Every structure is written in structure tokens, then in C-alpha cells.
Amino acid sequence: MVDNNTVMKSGRCIECGARETHGYSCYMIQHPSNYTEEGYKHLVNLFIDAYDNNWGTPYILKKNREIVKSVGKITNPIPNEERKRELRLWSMTIEDIYLGGEQNAIENINKWKEQIRNDLRFWNNGPSHFDRKMRWIS
């Protein structure tokens, strides 16, 4: 999750559209402004590989350490308030996790993971998702 530096406008995150939930708004992959372009590509590719290959947490952490060595700086060095942000309409955010109360949260987290993978699959078909126009909330 991101920290409390997430930029909110009218009660919604300006990057993913989620309402603020318990001081946090959404998952890291839904906030590309927190990363360098190379760092975000790494995060997305690691998520895709881990999801598609059903990797366990220890293996994901190992792969992350290996890749970060070659990527270098992954976090965005630009001060938070000066970063360029673009709203991308994700099909599911952290806000949706708690819709059914705590009893449904675990099930909803698994749905969220699947939805993020589906969104990335959609955005990765065609030109680089860094070059594509994002879907905007009107």
C-alpha cells in the first residue's frame, strides 16, 4: 500500500480513483508515480510473472532482489507533490476490498489480484502501457 502522501481530490485518489480507506488508498501497482519508469516496469513484470506462474512469496522476494540489482533506482526521486499523475480507471481498488465487510475481505483480495492482472493484460496488448492513453473517469 502507499503511504499517506497519496494525492486526494474530492475524496478520491487522483491516480487510481479509490476513496481513502483507513489512511491508505490503494495497492502499489496502482500508483506508478511512486516509481521510476524502469522501476514501475519491474514491478508490473514481477507481478505478472508471479501471478502467471503462481510463485510463492519467498521466490517473489528472491526474484525481486535479483532484478533490483540490475534496475538500480526504482522509487521516484521527484518530491511527491511535484510528480506527474494520470488517473487510470482500474476495475478494482482497495476500496472494493472492504465492501462486504471483514468476512469477505480475503475473498475480495483474491478477486482484486485477478482484476489487476486482467487490467494489466488489457493495457499491455498493443503499444507499451507507458505510451498508451489511459482510460479516464469522466
Image: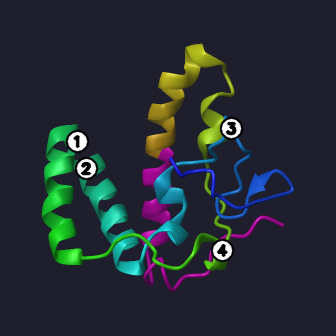
Cα–Cα span, label 2 and label 1: 6 Å
Q: Is residue 68 visible?
A: yes
Residue 87 percent location from the top left of the image: 68, 68
Q: Secondary structure at mark 3?
A: loop
Which residue is denoted by mark 2 in the rendering? 50
Which residue is denoted by mark 3 in the rendering? 21
Among numbered discs 4 and 3, the one appearing first in the sequence: 3
Q: Is residue 105 located in the magenta-colored stretch of the structure?
A: no
Asked if the residues shown at circle 2 and circle 3 are in contact, with their CB atoms under 8 angstroms apart, the answer is no
Q: Which image quadrant for residue 70?
A: bottom left
Question: Image check: 92 left or right of 51?
Answer: right
Asked if the residues shown at circle 2 and circle 1 are in contact, with their CB atoms under 8 angstroms apart, the answer is yes
Q: Which residue appears at 24% of the width and 76% of the height?
A: 72
Residue farthest toward the top in the current orientation of the protein: 103
Which residue is denoted by mark 4 in the rendering? 86
Which residue is denoted by mark 1 in the rendering? 54
Question: Where are the magenta residues, as a range?
Answer: 115-138
Q: Secondary structure at mark 1?
A: loop
Asked if the residues shown at circle 2 and circle 4 are in contact, with their CB atoms under 8 angstroms apart, the answer is no
Q: Which residue appears at 58% of the width and 48% of the height?
A: 26
Q: Look at label 4 and name its amino acid.
A: Glu
Quadrant in which the C terminus appears: bottom right
Q: Which residue appears at 42% of the width and 52% of the height?
A: 117
Cα–Cα span, label 2 and label 3: 26 Å
Q: Is residue 56 visible?
A: no
Residue 52 percent location from the top left of the image: 27, 50
Q: Nearer the viewer, residue 33 or 88?
A: 33
Q: Nearer the viewer, residue 114 or 10?
A: 10
Mark 4 or mark 1, which is nearer to you? Answer: 4
Crowd around label 2: few <14 · some 14–19 · many ≥20 (10 Å): some
Q: Secondary structure at mark 4?
A: loop
Q: Look at label 2 and name its amino acid.
A: Ala
